Amino acid sequence: MAEKGSDLLYDFCCNVCEEKNVNKEAMFYCQKCSKGLCEDCEGLHKMFYSLHIAYEKGEIDKWPARTKSFDDLQFCQHHSDRLIEMFCEDHGKLCCAMCLFHEHRPCVKLVLITEKIQAVYDSGDFHQISASINDAQQKLETAIDDTQEFLKQLQDSYEKASEEIKGLRQKINDILDELERKTVHSLDYMLQKLKHSLQSNEEKCLKATDGFKKISDAINKIKKDPKDLSFIAYQKALEMVSQAENLLKTLIVHRGSVVTFNSNPSIYGTLSGFSSLGNIECAEIQPEKSKHRTLEFTTKSLYNIGIASDKYEGDIRGICELPGGDILIADKENKRVKLIDAMYKVVAHLDMPTSPLDMCSISPTEVAVTVSDGCNTETVQFLKVNNRQIVKERVLKFPHHCNGISRYKEHLFIASHNTLYKYTMDGQLVKKIYEDTSYNYSVHKCAVSPDGSRLYVTNWAYNKLLTLSMDGTVLSSLDDPALRGRRGIHVSETGLLLICGKTSNNVVQVDDDGGVVTLASNEDGLDRPESVYYSASTGRLIVGNQNGNILVAEIKC
């Protein structure tokens, strides 16, 4: 039973209980009595008024339109026992008598509510309020979605920063391991050098001891049977004694030698002087920061990322950079995903069931890889990097070819020769976004703009770059003779659009107006480029070639 003075709000209150200052919900309504009734009061009502009909909640159309919550609109927000009677046009506030007395006595434009009603209806504002409420609700729902996305971005940035800290620690560990290796090598060398010297002296002592034994035996024989050899034996013995004394002097110098380690005081002093590995800062997200800036590079270097067990020279179809600076690449020909360190050496690899054709980042340590043999195996394999090891996670199977892949928020976009699909992260089809069945490879690779407003598709068949809206509408089509055989595509976190020209042997940057600028070409060592990746955080452009090499270009600051 509800207590007296309860603050619970009901759409309909029991009017009988209300007269007794008890707040209970009405479960029945009698039209003849014009009263709401709780279950207890309805029993008494039936006893005294057997001909009255009490309607249940299921027959709400027989109930009055006015509700308790509707009635509460009449009461002042600040003085809950006072009815709203006035409207202050000076402040745009609803007022009760108490508000008027305490806050609005000096105000000039005070109007009775009854006088404002007709004006609101005449202006049509009352009929517009529902649309305003809906608009505000939609904006609030968008703000909630944006906040959830910002929270995810915040968590992703935390995980990225955490991985960068671990990456830095690993690099420091590598440096310390190398210093330790060199120092231990010097220690081993010193030990072997001193041991060799002492062992050499020991051998000389043993040899001298053996010589004294022989000369002593000879002298004893000469004493028993004097011969002319006495002088020779005597002289040789003197020489041997002199040599032994010199040897003993040498032993005195070397026998007390030990190896010691004197640490470099600068190492401890430098490390102990740091309060942390770096500064933690709050940075505003600026997706448009360098969108229209043309990239310029200071150095361009080629690296071979083959390993001994590779059967072929390689074909790099996908590239992703990890927060610590390591790189994941998809090697189609060798059917492998390889992990490369900051020195561009392969530190781990994972064999795939068939050819990996593309990859995209899912989280700071996780990627999704399209794996396809063009026949039976059409999957997206999720991989995670943990302690510099590539670990298989879940796999999604699809009824169509899987070639290009990109991600935006909680959706995957998969290019399938001539169709672009949108899927949820668990593999549920959302929609078929775009299709061109006029020729195969009309939808080869895909990418998404950072704000999720545009999709980019490379049309290899007709040598075009398509820009699509999220509903699949073609916004623009770029056909530039400087870019032939369009294959790999990448949009950086700052909005830079980069494309590989396999036939033209180049990588270009495309601006919003369709302008094309060549960033690297065959003169830089490109050989049928298939994939490209640019990281604004490291200022590094990486291009994967069909010959298994990667081109790495460092940005000009």
Image: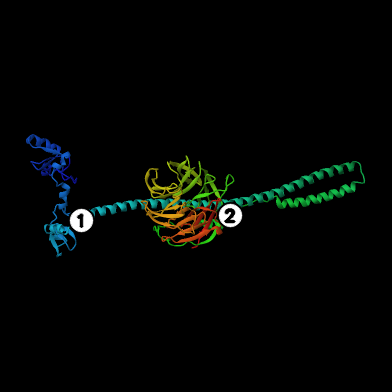
- Which disc, if any, is residue 128? 1
User: Is residue 363 something one can see in this rendering?
Assistant: no
Residue type at numbered disc 2: Ser
- Which disc, if any, is residue 424? none
- Across and down, in percent, residue 512 comes to 41, 60
Q: Nearer the viewer, residue 263 or 550?
A: 550
Left or right, residue 120 beside residue 242? left
- Across and down, in percent, residue 88 comes to 16, 61
Left or right, residue 133 beside residue 273? left
Q: For mark 1, does the 10 Å Cα neighbourhood hold few (<14), some (14 to 19), or many (20 or more) residues? A: few
Q: Nearer the viewer, residue 550 or 516?
A: 516
Task: Label 2, secondary structure: give it.
Answer: loop
Residue type at numbered disc 1: Gln
User: Is residue 189 something one can see in this rendering?
Assistant: yes
- Across and down, in percent, residue 554 comes to 51, 59
- Across and down, in percent, residue 89 comes to 17, 62
Q: Nearer the viewer, residue 336 or 263?
A: 336
Q: For mark 2, does the 10 Å Cα neighbourhood hold few (<14), some (14 to 19), or many (20 or more) residues? A: few
Disc 2: which residue: 263
Residue for point 80% across, 43% down: 210
Q: CA distance from mark 2 to mark 1?
A: 80 Å
Q: How many marks?
A: 2
Task: Label 1, secondary structure: give it.
Answer: helix
- Eye-nearest disc, 2 or 1: 1
